[in-house]
Image (cartoon, coloured by chain):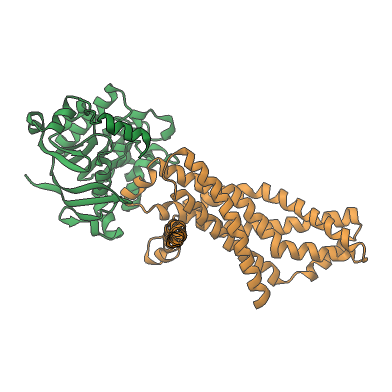
Amino acid sequence: MENAIEIKGLQTHYGDREILKNITVSIPQGRTTVILGGSGCGKSTLLKHLIGLLRPTKGQIIIKGKDISGLQEDELNEVRKKMGVLFQGAALLNSLTLGENVALPIREHTRLNDSTIGIMVRMKLDQVGLSGFESFCPSQLSGGMKKRAGLARALALDPELLFFDEPSAGLDPVTAAGLDELILKLRNVFRMTIVVVTHELASVFTIADYVIMLDRGEVAFNGTLEELKASDNEKVRMFLERRPEKETYSPDDYFRVIAGD
Amino acid sequence: MSSIVEGFFGAVGRMALPLRRDVHDAAKIINSAFYWSFISPLKGRPIRFRASISEMVKAGYNSVPIVATISLFVGIILALQAAYQLKRVGALIYVANLVGVSLTRELGPIMTAIIVSGRSGSAFAAEIGSMKAAEEIDALTTMGINPVRYLVVPKLVALMVMVPALTVLADLIGIFGGFLLATTAVGLHPYSYFQQTVNALLIKDVFTGLLKAWAFGIVITLVGAYQGFKVEGGAEEVGRRTTASVVTSIFLVIIVDLFFTSLFYFFT
């Protein structure tokens, strides 16, 4: 199995706090990889490293044979043209219409004329089921429609790598399932490498081929979906069975906590 | 003893470290704003012309009524205050000199800059800040679009053009306000007031005023952009940063004014 992204010894800090501790995993080509984990485990931070928004303290992120952690801004932009990102809140530019939002990366990176760009925009919006909405403003849309529009923008330049940050957060189950379906379609039809950060178990079982589970900045598990289901790792079982973490306080500890020292 | 010394240096360090980071962030924004405005067009990456025009309309054209009204009143007030003193020495005609020179050299640029900081500087901080809070800035970056080039450069170009332009307007209308008052309430002859103004003004007075206005435009844009990009949290911080941008830009406009005025006093 060929790898699209390789992460080697990734370490990162916010100030003095260590967020990711020596992460070494690889993300297979042409598959859907889900990065799983509880809140605050560092999964969003890992995603921000993969799309080049944060630079690691140490370690390498190799995308298509290039270590992006050491690239200059110009070189990084070349890599970014092959990437599409759907942010948690869709992050459409509110001052532009849907059509202009989708056209933005095309206008910026190609020299196509307006009528060609118009056709491409309508194609991309149609792909996500939003044809006829190009003159709408983001503020006129529902949450699910915004996400789909954000996906159309991410697809604008036909990326090889597609990243999703919490795609089903804040959506009703039906809309979330629709988005999952769209993710499956993109993998099956376009053979894209897809990376999804989420903690929604339902969508993990639908879309994932490969799973990376993080726990407190470390890789707790990585393997295929079948391996995840069969795993007897305590952390994985807790997550899959929705068991709360055990109280580890002794009465003495509790006293120390409330006394404030 | 040593603990007092330690405490002192500790306090200084704790104050200096965030300041160092602020200076670093500000320098980064200033550096890339100037790079994308002046250097990269020479390398074949032009500034966004249409966006610059629309920023000019928002920041310049739309503030014409308020700038005109305020400078008319400032002109009248100046003429009144000047007449109050000059009447005693029987030199009422010098109202024209005082109004003309103080407006073009000082009050025109500074009133315009203060109005523009309040209107546009705060709007820049709020716009960029709310985009930062909604991950729109991150989205631009991941699309390979430099946020400074996309957002700040059109605003910088707009204010570099529009603050001097508004200053010219403020000068003219302010002088007209002084003229109105002097020819009606004070009773000066319109033609002699006009002639006196023309004789009193030097090209230098107008030019130094416009140069200052140009610098104020840069200061206002960069402060607004800096405060906007500093937003980390949500809506509450956008509000805080917007207020901070107005206060800081008015403060820095005055500092820059002091610098330029003393420069012109000694070197022209």
Which quadrant would the C terminus of chain B be assigned to in this image? bottom right
Q: Is residue B265 above or below residue B152?
A: below
> In which image quadrant can residue A237 be found?
top left
Residue B136 in the image, given as x and y percentages of width and height: 38, 43
Residue B61 in the image, given as x and y percentages of width and height: 61, 50
Residue B207 in the image, given as x and y percentages of width and height: 66, 68
| Residue B82 makes an appearance in the image | yes
Which quadrant would the N terminus of chain B be assigned to in this image? bottom left
- Judge from the rendering whether residue A78 lies leftward or rightward of residue B26; answer left or right: left
- Decide which of A29, A224 is in the foreground and name it: A224
Residue A98 in the image, given as x and y percentages of width and height: 38, 37
Q: Determine the residue positioned at 72% across, 50% down.
A: B70
- The orange-coloured chain is labelled B
- The green-coloured chain is labelled A
Q: Is residue B187 above or below residue A173?
A: below
- Judge from the rendering whether residue A261 lies leftward or rightward of residue B195; answer left or right: left
| Residue B60 makes an appearance in the image | no
